[in-house]
Image (cartoon, rainbow, N blue to C red):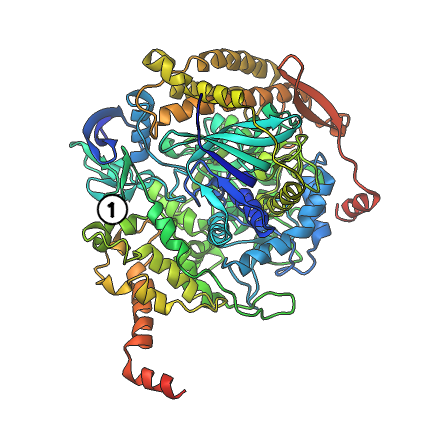
Amino acid sequence: MAEQATFRIWRGSRGEGKFVNYTTPITSGMVVLDAVHGIQASDANDLAVRWNCKAGKCGSCSAEINGKPRLMCMTRLNTLDLTEPVTVEPMQTFPHVKDLVTDVSWNFAVKKKIQKFTPRAADAADGTWRVKQADVDRPQEFRKCIECFLCQDVCHVLRDHHLHDEFAGPRFFVYAANLEMNPIDSGDRVKAIKEDLGIGYCNITKCCTKVCPEEIKITDNAIIPLKERVVDDFFDPLGGLIKIFR
Amino acid sequence: MADYPVHTYDVLVIGAGGAGLRAAIEASAAGCRTAVVTKSLLGKAHTVMAEGGMAAAMGHVDDRDNWRVHFADTMRGGQYLNNPRMAELHAKEAPARVRELEAWGAIFDRTKDGRILQRNFGGHRYPRLAHVGDRTGLEMIRTLQDHGIHQGMDVYAEHTVVKLFIDGNRVAGAFAYDRERGRFKVFHAKAVVLATGGVGRSFKVTSNSWEYTADGQALAYNAGAALLDMEFVQFHPTGMVWPPSVKGILVTEGVRGEGGVLKNNQGKRFMFDDIPENYRSSTADNPEEGWRYTQGDKSSRRPPELLTRDHVARCINREVKAGRGSPHGGVFLDISWIKEKLPNSVEHIKKKLPSMYHQFKQLADLDITKEPMEVGPTTHYIMGGIQVDADTQMTAVEGLFAAGECAAGLHGANRLGGNSLSDLLVFGKLAGEYAAKFAKVQATGSVNQSEIETAGKDALAPFERGAAGENPFTIQSELQDIMQNLVGIVRVENEMAEALDKIAKLRERAARAGITGNIEYNTGWHTALDLENMLAISEMIALAGIERKESRGGHFRDDYPAKSEEWGKFNLRIVRGADGHPKLERVPVVPMTEEMKQIVQENL
């Protein structure tokens, strides 16, 4: 590995700005976030970047590295071509704040609109439930989500069509699926998933699944099953008749 | 005159990790107008890094477990410097706090009969840690976050508190800046809960996130509260050591709980060579028994890898210093060997330790199902912190409460793994409950306008010095070297004294820190403002470290390697002296009741 590498980092505020090249020393095993921190400590003290855990667990350091949505802390330099400058820029789907930082508050507002966890009556006298591991494996997969919002960033419904008011995005289908498939939950969010979260806009291109650092099978395991529930409830003529006569 | 926006609340919670969110949920539920201020985005706090689980004597896996055993384990782990009342409350209330999380949407791993599964951990006699694979902290914070946002609390994300306002001897509010826009805000509050976590950012090799800059400890001290047990810093035995950029990242104790073993470069399981007397009767004396224990055999004793963290960390340190370490200055932690015992070991390891599998695969190109990991000690936790009343969590300042890592008392000289997440819940709830009670009967204290002016002016000073000032990142990095090398896992008097000298010089330089750029999301400015707290609290860790002339728990003195009976009678307390400098006091440890003493005897 070369002893130094050049990073082309987006600098600026509120969407205005330009790429600036920084050359910084690198060592074995480094990740992009290390390089960004090195640049920040020496050449650009005011370089804005979010991070917390540096271990892929908090989902703070999301960015686009050579055009791909990635966590900076989990992107090793030896997986990148260092003969060219490495481009690091903020997520494009959210309003820009400064340098690599974007305003992701929309995501928090969307979550608040989804009916919260609503437990059914307890199974035991002490107020607890009896649930098999096999019945929670799937919702546990969804609960691995670290809310990095890379799936939101890559989703064309949000990124290209800006349907933020009508479409909740993959993160919140994973969230809704975790609630819908939790054997202790008694809520019914299917109508909301169709009407408020706008699941119909998703045409299952699986871009979200590809960028998920937690390797959650967002499309196959969350979105498609939710779409099936929507179809069962709203578009299935036989099911509709049964409901009428029930 | 400065005209900053003013926000008025009954209860202001500073910090949105496990303790802060739990406190805020409780205060909101009590009908108080509640705000949470957090340096990060909601749900990103350091709690997400907790891996192994939360200790609660529910007895789902071994029905011999109960609060009395948990209490005795906690006291023994803390070498009897713990506040016994806090250890009692913690052991008694933890199970209810865990069940409550399930009622709020957490999904724990299950036992065969469908209850919450519990796993083995160092220092805990029975399998006690409720867990979700090795991402229990994430499960906890997400559950509290998703429940909390529907409770009516206001969240101020990416805001840093730099000062508490005091009216007489009671808290009146706080001064904060908004990291994104750089704007100042004044909070008026009847009660304030500090839940800001630890101090690990002051050490070079640490498992802690950037947020751990000793804010709560410094805010409380400056407000007139006392700090306790500051010499006791926990070095977790197993952090990553290679590659360099990931050095310090945590490798969960759960690896050892699931059967992982520690070996030196001669292939020897060195932990069998050094089993402390007070744990001898409860520790396996051969590998086969240790393995059976990790697989749930109730008649077996735990393997020596699951001794307390302070002890395991020092044993690893000793192997490395004696030249028996791994190529990159650690020792080997091997879980892959269980393929000798389990036919489906690869899938088993991936299921039980998914984050560890990915962490090593992605960051170190290493498959833990096939090869041993290299691990070494990493700064992980501070047992000491703000002194609080055991039952209410109130500090010496009226209306000021503290909970979680920033508070002291529960863990004594050494914390058991798994007792932190339960600490956050048990004492976060109590802090929120009593803060709410306090707020309901008190009027809001008054905040002096001139203090607001001064706080704003001080915070902006680094801009005035500009590029001519000291680079804040350089000062931070030098502090990390000082604490790592001179006040680390093995301490001696002259090195700690040297650290004090160096910290004093760094404080002078920090007062000259300068930054460039504008005020919006300026990480250099944020770092410059963090330095004061980091330096002040680092100094106190060194001061207390020099004062305690013995080795106990997380505090190991090469010049006083033995435990002293005399020192076992005191905690060290730090208050601000009349001269404005930290004043050390010896205070007698809180005595156990006769019943508690009996419980300890029963469980030796």
Residues B510 and B416: in front is B510
Residue located at (45% from left, 58% from top): B348
Residue located at (33% from left, 29% from top): B520
Residue A82, position in %: x, y?
Answer: 19, 33
Three-letter residue code for mark 1: Thr
Residue B183, position in %: x, y?
Answer: 39, 29
- Classify residue A20 as left or right of residue B148: left
Residue A78 figure quarter = top left
Q: Disc 1 marks which residue? A: A93
Q: Is residue B29 placed above or below A197 in the rendered structure?
A: above
Residues A36 and B181: in front is B181
Q: Is residue B417 placed above or below B457 in the rendered structure?
A: below
Residue B470, position in %: x, y?
Answer: 38, 14
Query: For the image shown, how many numbered marks are present on the structure?
Result: 1
Q: Is residue B58 placed above or below B123 in the rendered structure?
A: below
Residue located at (63% from left, 51% from top): B94
Q: Is residue B474 visible?
A: yes
- Classify residue B42 as left or right of residue B564: left
Residue located at (69% from left, 43% from top): B87
In the image, farthest residue toward the bottom? A245
In the structure shown, which secondary structural element does the residue marked by tag 1 occupy? loop
| Chain of the residue displaying label 1 | A
